[in-house]
Amino acid sequence: MSSDFYTSSILPFSAIIIKICRAYTNTQEDFEDYYQEVCLQIWKTRDNFREQSEWSTWIYRLSLNVCLTLLKKNKNNKQYFASDSLPEEVVEDSHAFADESLNQLYDAIRQLSEIDRAVILLYLEEKTYQEIADIIGTNPNNIGVRIKRIKERLKKLLTQKKILHGKVN
Amino acid sequence: MEKSIESIWKEGFLKNDALVAPKLNNLYNQKSTHIIDKYKRMFKINLIAVVAGSFLFLGVSFILGIPVMGIGFFLILNVIVLVNKKLLPGLQKIDKNVSSYQYLKTFDAWMKENISVNSKMAGYYYPLFFLSFILGFWFSNNSQNLFNEILGYPHEFYLVYGIPVFWTIPVIFITGLLAIFGGRIYNWDLNIVYGRVLKKLEELIADMEELRS
């Protein structure tokens, strides 16, 4: 990968990749692997970008597709998906961000199913229902209902952990 | 203090260090963990290993005096490789620049096609492997001695029109069973290796289909 391509076409959008990869990984090591993998896939498939959508939308889509199909190996060489029950020692990335509330929110997001994670991440990134549906490939009519359900689940998870100092909206 | 999920998200990312991109290390050499890339790699390695193994076995079979078995195995293994090699371009063509649903569906479709083709083939190659094995011994240079060694006592073949009937019946029976259950044996074998991955794929797609409905 040329550093020019990375600097001009990926780095300005790295926030998207970081936000998505954090939601699908549990350790810093995994996060860096996923980040690298997404960057590699963007570079490898850059010629497929047809400018039918925004470059950022394309990055959202590709990042999610890569994260949804990534497998990681743990220390015992057993394969598991991001949403599987993880051994305690693997769940260690609870302080990825300086903001404690954000760390707790990510902890809660990681407990959702892969698809729910994708939906809520796109929602939090202020994508419209139509955009979310286009990226994921679903029906926009159901997105609203699903988001409502996910938010309720997140609130419950956050409340359970007593991480919010006040009421969660 | 009231804090919504949305405000936690927005405020959390306002801090400067929240979105520092990790350095890209040795990207070219890094082993990809992506399922599709992993499959491509595994597929290629498997195919090369099977071809190498078939040549090795062919050579060894001549040395051991069981060339029919070696030739049989060699031919069957290389047909399997050829068929699977034809399936590989389908995997390489999977476009990541589509919606997540389409992407997973395309991958799933490729997997299903691959499993279906190999499952059908298994109904032929398991019996053929078995027959090659039996015929290999039958036409070996010292088959009589081998049988005596296996049985632990001298054994005379009872031949009807030159055919060892008592040995042929169980061979036909086992060959038939392998032809009938070859596909199931393949699927059972596949489930041990890829069962979890396939189940997870199914779950992901089912979840998306629920959203689409």
Image (spheres, coloured by chain):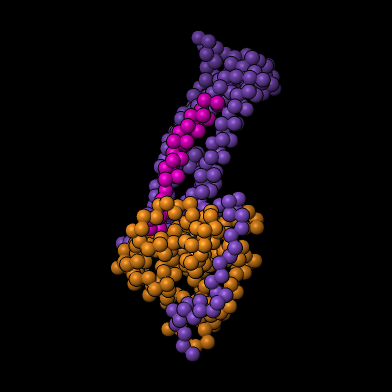
Chain colours: A orange, B purple
Q: Is residue A165 left or right of residue A55?
A: right
Q: Is residue A100 visible?
A: yes
For the point 42% across and 74% down, the residue is: A124
Viewer-side residue, A156 vs A22: A22
For the point 49% across and 24% down, the residue is: B172
Viewer-side residue, A68 vs B77: A68
| Residue A61 percent coordinates (x, y) | 42, 61
Q: In the figure, residue A121 lies in which quadrant?
A: bottom left
Point out the stretch of residues depicted in magenta: B73-101
Q: Is residue B104 left or right of residue B128?
A: left
Is residue B45 within the magenta segment?
no
Q: Is residue B112 left or right of residue A52?
A: right
| Residue B175 percent coordinates (x, y) | 49, 27
For the point 37% across and 66% down, the residue is: A132
For the point 43% across and 66% down, the residue is: A118
| Residue B152 percent coordinates (x, y) | 69, 22
